[in-house]
Image (cartoon, rainbow, N blue to C red):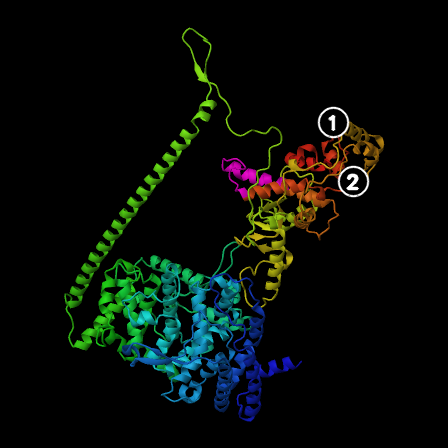
Amino acid sequence: MCTYIHRYVLRNRPESLADLREPVIEAFSKFIDLLGMVQNADPLKRQRGIHVEREQPWEILFNFLIVLQQPIQQFIQWCISDRAILVEAVRMTLRKHEQIAGRDHIPYKRHEVAPDLVGSSKMELFVFDIQKEAVSIHQPLARVLAGLLTGASAHNLSLPDLLQISSTDVQSPLFLMEVSSRVLVLAAQVNAGMWKRNGYSVARQVGAYQYHYPRGMMYDKDIVMLQAMAAVLDPSVFLYSVIHKFRLDTWIASPGSDPSVRRGESSEDALRFFLNEAEEFVFLFITIFCERWVAGVGEGVKEMDSLRRELVHKLFIAPLSHSQILKEFRMSERENEIDQLLKKVATLRKGGGMSKAVFVLRAEFEDEYNPFFYHYTRTDHSMAEDAQRRRIKAAGGILSPEAASPAELPPLCGPFQGVLRLTASPVTHRLFNCVFRQAADPVSKFWSDKLLHESLYLCAVMLREEDSSRPDSLASAAIGLHGANGFLEELVTLLCSRRAEEHKPLLSWIVQNLKKYREKSTGRSSPPTSAMNVQLEAGGSAVRDKEMAAILAQDKALAERKELVRKQKEKAMAQMQSMQRKFLEKNRQQMLDLEGPEVDEPDVGPSVAVKSPTLRAVGLTVLVGRPPETREEETCILCQADSKDAAVQDKVFVQAVCVQRSCVLRQSSTECSPADVKELDTKCDYLAARADQPLGMFTSGCGHHMHADCWKRFIESKQQEHGRRYFYPLPGQSVQWTSGEFLCPLCQSFSNSVVPLLPPVCSAPSEAPQANVGFSEWREIVDLAVDLAESKNVLEGNQPHLLWDKLSELFRNFKRPSSYLPGRPSERRDMISIFSQCTYMMAFKADPDERNERVCVAEWNNCAYTITSLEMNTRRQGQSLLSTLSSRQVDYLGSLVKIGLDPALRPSLNQLGSIVRRLVNSFLLESPPFSENPSILEIDAFSMMVSLPALHPF
């Protein structure tokens, strides 16, 4: 009850809090103490050398913070609404944050740096190696503080005054941004693939942190904290501290050196990790400088503006229906606001037929598209790029430089104006110089297309920002007025290079603006054939010469490799020929003994005489009788143990399969209505399947092998893991794990059961002597059944008659118990039961029932229908049944046949009699009038052939 009262109070904030300051501050103090208990919880440490043995559960703490997400935002709104409460709340949060940080002992050391970057040879940094130390994603105190800092502009407070720090204090801002920068660098490294040995849990935590429901109070608040500290700190100190966290300080300090040296990775991973981290850093730089659609950061920006921008970027990817939009935003309580925004930014396109109506983004809002939108996932980025290419192609395939330029950004609020000083930082100029120089060098490998695109976009955004605010620091540095960090020549070289072919419009816009600024700074305009064009021609010639030299060098290296491969092949062939000669010389006598004399054929005509050698089998002794079992070695995809390992030799192997109802062989071309499906359910007989195949059971699967024990543990762990996920979607969220559905651990294909691998039926040992039963005995049974069926009592009656009493004496000759399951039969029977019960529940939509006679009937139909479907498919392709199936698919298909013959599925004697009666009635040519039993012409012969061997009591 108390929780509902608190929720009601937080949602109903009064306009004036002058009389409620002390209660609000006291409540906020208690709330901060609660969040302090979660600070730095569940730390993560990068696994080195070997993969983590067991992934720790992480969803519980995320779920707890998700529950607190709305109260945190409401507390922030209460504090922002009053100046005195805001100042006191910031002071309390800082004090609590410092207490916890003092407990954790964050190191603060001096670090050597290039003097031309930060103005001195040394600077003090918080030295922390994220690859070696433990990092926690959960930093609620820092995020609450970031949310409180957005209220500074509402009360005309500067960030230093609100944080109570002086202009010369560097340690305090670095301390405040430390935990946020750690988490952002951790997320960047995980996205770069540097934490793969930690398993899926770390990747999913980062996915929930950046892209799912907790994003608003985690990732977004960390970005706001870095923006606030960028406004307070010296821009070079701020950038260099973040660069140091990304391990890019060596690259920035000496651009001409190998940036992959001294990074602690193996040679094959160093370059890949360097490029990934550089791309993530520039992406973070773009986010800090460009993302201003947050209330309190951008001037005049409200929550509706932020929601509108999210909606524009979602609709830019593809048109969405109303339900998809609500699912993307997960804001059912703000549905009215979303509907209002949809009327402004999109038009409703009505669907035809069965398709849904979708909202299409208006053309005037396409200019707001940011290719590096920070709420995009990797999939969203790729789809947005494809959508942009389609729009360019539809517009004629040519994009003008002005159209390629970034859109104007909203101005920053007063407290965050210091972010604009990043354009004047020597570190920014050095960053552009390094990226563009490496990209312009045709033989350099320390560049990527994504890194170049990000840098060009960031440079264009900064130039447009300077055009509106007129500091002109970046433009003057680009043309070389601020030392050796100029990059105009590299841009001109790139303009003539094929490496930047896709980014030519944006690159042209940047060069044109820099050219205008140079003409303005020198006081004279350049004619069309001025130094710029000469520079362009010279740059293009130089680039072409370098590219030609690089191509010649690559051709020479390729020719050398081909020659080396040819020599190695000749050497190997010579060794093989030498070994063959030695073998023939050593075994010459044995080979002569194996040769036979030639035999003359008798003359069959005056001019025909044929002479041929006698054919003789040479080799190992050939066994006559039952062929031996030639089974390939199986390996469990979970524990990686093979079937020949003595420790697991008696374990049962299973394969992941998907059992489903199918009407793919239905001969009627009309669609099934719900009424038709319901009628099929009531009238479908899986034992005497009709020839038109209206409905059947089909089994498919990837066929990957697992131990039954490993599969059980895997299912149990997944059920526990997905039982803890309430608020955000994760991989496999659409799978009902608690109902027996799962994803294959190797290929992630959908499955809902497993089929055990069984030995061949012919290899089963007999436990009892086989009865001498011949065709005459079987015919005697059929004749007696026909005579009894044609009797007067049977024909005049309306009830079915059971013939077991008359046939019991003859059936005793057929009855013989058998068990051919070696090793661990109980575990095999359990796996067979799991598969048969899944088939039974799917076929009859019933609850599990192991004693029901229809269990074996559903399995026989499953086997027959699956084989028929595969055969029809391969026949249409003009191939045989087994030629197109992989070995794993052949295994599970063979297991279907063996399970149908398994004694565990054999019905009881009474049930067997009932099944036989139904089948025998189908053979009778004279059925009772108005009988519902199908005639033999209406029955699928193959389905009956599959069920008959299973009815024979081995």
Question: In this picture, is 826 found above or below 275?
Answer: above
Q: Quadrant of residue 607?
A: top left
Counting residues from the start of the chain, the first of labels 2 and 1 encountered is 1
Q: Which mark is residue 774?
A: 1
**Viewer-side label of 2, 1:** 1
Q: Main secondary structure of the magenta part?
A: helix
Question: In this picture, is 240 found above or below 860?
Answer: below
Badge 2 element: helix
Residue 299 visible to an observer of this rendering: no
- Mark 2 surroundings: few (<14), some (14-19) or many (≥20) residues within 10 A: some
The amino acid marked with disc number 2 is Leu
- Mark 1 surroundings: few (<14), some (14-19) or many (≥20) residues within 10 A: few
Residue 475: in magenta span:
no
Q: Position of residue 554 (x, y in %)?
A: 27, 52
Q: Position of residue 768 (x, y in %)?
A: 75, 35
* Horizontal side of residue 234 vs 333, given as left or right: left
Question: In this picture, is 630 found above or below 193?
Answer: above
Q: Are marks 2 and 1 in contact (CB under 8 Å)?
A: no
Q: Quadrant of the N terminus?
A: bottom right
The amino acid marked with disc number 1 is Gly
* Horizontal side of residue 274 vs 337, given as left or right: left
Q: Position of residue 386 (x, y in %)?
A: 39, 59
Q: What residue lies at 39% left-to-right and 32% top-to-bottom? A: 582
In the image, 537 versus 810, the foreground residue is: 810
Residue 879: in magenta span:
yes
Q: Position of residue 179 (x, y in %)?
A: 46, 77
Badge 1 element: loop
Q: Which residues are magenta?
A: 863-887
Residue 752 visible to an observer of this rendering: yes
Q: Which residue in the structure is indicated by mark 2?
A: 909
